[in-house]
């Protein structure tokens, strides 16, 4: 099983999701602290040249790799990756199951504003406080999204590649 969390930039909600998945953050409904948020690997660290790259975050306790990807506005990236994976699975006869889990529905407006200032305009002094506030607002939804993604992964779904849009976790 391979887990790939995806969203617009691949550095905020996806990094939080990967950290929850890998149990780097407390597994509860408790709001995260500013320090916990800013210490999440890759949180607010990726730039334009990182869009479209699979970023490896670690191996979970079940031996499954966890990745993130920033897809920008292009909603065709994940379906194209799915088609490529299915083609390779067919040609080379491997059956690794892969879940793409979209974290975009969890993004509150404060996080979007923070990302624009911090990553887009390089004004961290304005962007980071918005990002932290947004992360605190959506950490509950991200935690539940990760729980759901893991449950689906453990359920033995029939498809080799699954795309979860996660609209039920909208902030």
Image (spheres, rainbow, N blue to C red):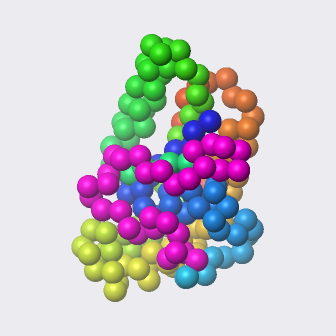
Residue 114's x, y, as percent? 39, 74
**For residue 102, above or below residue 156:** below
Asked if residue 167 can be seen in this view, the reply is: no
Which stretch did the figure color magenta? 36-65
In the picture shown, does residue 29 fall above or below 90? below
110 in magenta? no
* Residue 62 included in the magenta stretch of the image: yes
Across and down, in percent, residue 11 comes to 42, 61
The secondary structure making up most of the magenta span is loop
Identify the residue at the far bottom of this view: 125
Q: Residue at x 43, y 51 (%)?
A: 55
Closer to the camera, 103 or 35? 35
Image quarter of the N terminus = top right
Image coordinates for residue 43, horizontal then vertical, percent: 46, 67
The residue positioned 44% from the left and 64% from the top of the image is 42
- Name the one closer to the observer, 144 or 52: 52
Can residue 28 be seen by looking at this rendering? Answer: yes
Q: Quadrant of the C terminus?
A: bottom right
**Location of residue 4 with respect to 116 vertically, above or below:** above
Residue that appears at 58% across and 77% down: 36
Residue 112 in percent (x, y) is at 40, 67
| 78 sits left or right of 139 in the view | left
Identify the residue at image location x=57%, y=58%. 17
Residue 48 lies in what quarter of the image?
Answer: bottom left
Counting labels gives 0
């Amino acid at each position: 099983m391979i887990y790939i969390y995806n969203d617009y930039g691949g550095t905020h909600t996806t990094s939080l999701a990967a950290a929850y998945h890998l149990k780097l953050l407390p597994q509860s409904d408790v709001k995260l602290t500013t320090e916990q948020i800013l210490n999440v690997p890759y949180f607010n660290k990726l730039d334009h040249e990182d869009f479209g790259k699979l970023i490896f975050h670690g191996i979970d306790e079940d031996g499954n790799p966890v990745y993130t990807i920033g897809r920008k506005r292009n909603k065709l990236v994940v379906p194209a990756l799915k088609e490529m994976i299915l083609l390779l699975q067919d040609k080379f006869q491997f059956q690794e199951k892969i879940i793409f889990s979209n974290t975009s529905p969890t993004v509150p407006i404060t996080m979007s504003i923070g990302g624009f200032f911090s990553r887009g305009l390089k004004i961290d002094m304005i962007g980071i406080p918005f990002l932290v506030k947004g992360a605190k607002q959506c950490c509950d939804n991200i935690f539940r999204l990760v729980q759901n993604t893991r449950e689906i992964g453990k359920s033995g779904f029939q498809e080799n590649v699954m795309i979860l849009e996660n609209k039920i976790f909208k902030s």
